[in-house]
Amino acid sequence: MHIQIIGDLAKMPPVPPQKAEFPKFVDSLWCVYIVSVLAAFNAEFVTYPLDLIKTRLQIQGEQTNKNNNGKIGKAPYRGMFRTAIGITKEEGLSRLWQGVHAAFARHLVYSGTRIITYKALKEKVFKPNPQEKYFPVWQSALCGITAGAFSQYISSPADLLKVQLQMEGKRRLLGLPPRVHGMYDAFQKVWSSGGIRGLWKGSVPNVQRAALVNLGDLTTYDVAKRFIMRHTNLPDNHLVHMMASSCAGLVAASMGTPADVIKTRVMNQPLDEKGRGLLYTSSIDCLRKTVRLEGIGALYKGFVPIWMRMAPWSLTFWLTYEEIVKFMGAESW
């Protein structure tokens, strides 16, 4: 009898090890939001100096205000490395992180919103088959564009303040009076000169840029990761994350640079007493003047630092995001 029971037990299939149960909240949208913000903070701090250099490069060559002689001048040209060295020597090493607190404020809204919007659209609207790793490119692209445009629009005021803070060091070196003395001061002055509409100055090119960037970042990462895993034997590991995020950074930089140039110039221009721009009346006007006065190549000013920033930003963000969700036991991206 005992021998028969033992024999029956030997024939039974092995019991698979029990998977550790994690709290249900790890897959909720609010938890994804928090993880996205933490990953964005980490990526932003690591790559922020390149964003500052990119911003400085993008306004080079544009017309500035009239000087003391009543003539309109132009900002001098500097390359990426000369700009970086110039900021360090003339303003101090810490100035490479000037305005980073405004960037954090932006990502507190932007990064969390873009991820949960993309995830919600993908899972609740298009509802892909969970057994299939393939997600149609056109659906992913639509999710990426929508998530980028929506999240950027609601976070545009923080982006405006960041751009203005980034330019203060250069204004003071040129002998110009400072426009703002901090994030709160910048907010007050924008509000007093343009009201609530002033906080969304440059929001149109900003939203256009974000839609293109997230089409490049979210969509490319999502598609590239699943393409790599579907056509190779690689598991969902750091190597796959690095390969997918590298593709995402390159595509995002290529698609977003022209809109980023226009956005930066519109946001950085001085205003009259009625809150209207003194250099450009709209993003279309800025695009037309930039191409006419400086050539179409001006739309890709700052591409190298943008790409050099987006590649490590995307890599840092996605590695951080994937590592946190893996640690928490949630589903990977």
Image: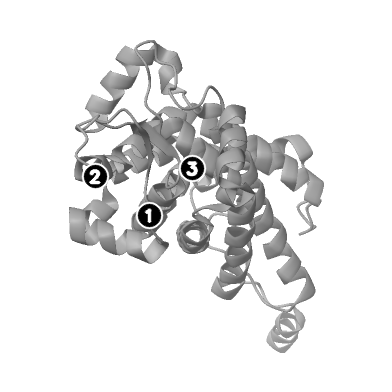
**Image x and y of residue 51, in percent:** 40, 52
Camera-side residue of 18 and 57: 57
Q: Amino acid at mark 2?
A: Gly
Q: Which residue is mark 2?
A: 169
Q: Secondary structure at mark 3?
A: helix
Front residue (pair 160, 79): 79
Residue of label 3: 111
Residue type at mark 1?
A: Ile
At x 60%, y 35%, the residue is 287
Of 277 and 131, the residue lying toward us: 277
| Few, some or many residues within 10 Å of mark 1 (<14, 14–19, 20+) | many
Viewer-nearest of discs 1 and 3: 1
Q: Look at the picture and state if 188 lies above or below 324.
A: above
- Whichever of callouts 2 and 3 sits on the residue coming sooner in the sequence is 3
Residue at label 1?
Answer: 53
Horizontal and vertical percent position of residue 234: 68, 77
The relative height of residue 303 versus residue 122 in the rendered view (above or below) is: below
Crowding at dot 3, Cα within 10 Å, few <14 / some 14-19 / many 20+, comes out as many
User: In the drawing, does residue 265 fall left or right of residue 15?
Assistant: left
Indicate the quadrant where residue 273 lies.
top left
Q: Foreground mark, 2 or 3?
A: 2
Looking at the rendered image, the quarter that the C terminus falls into is bottom right
Could you tell me if the residues under marks 2 and 3 are in contact, i.e. CB atoms within 8 Å?
no
Q: Give the CA distance from mark 1 to mark 2.
A: 12 Å
Q: Residue at x 45, y 62 (%)?
A: 316
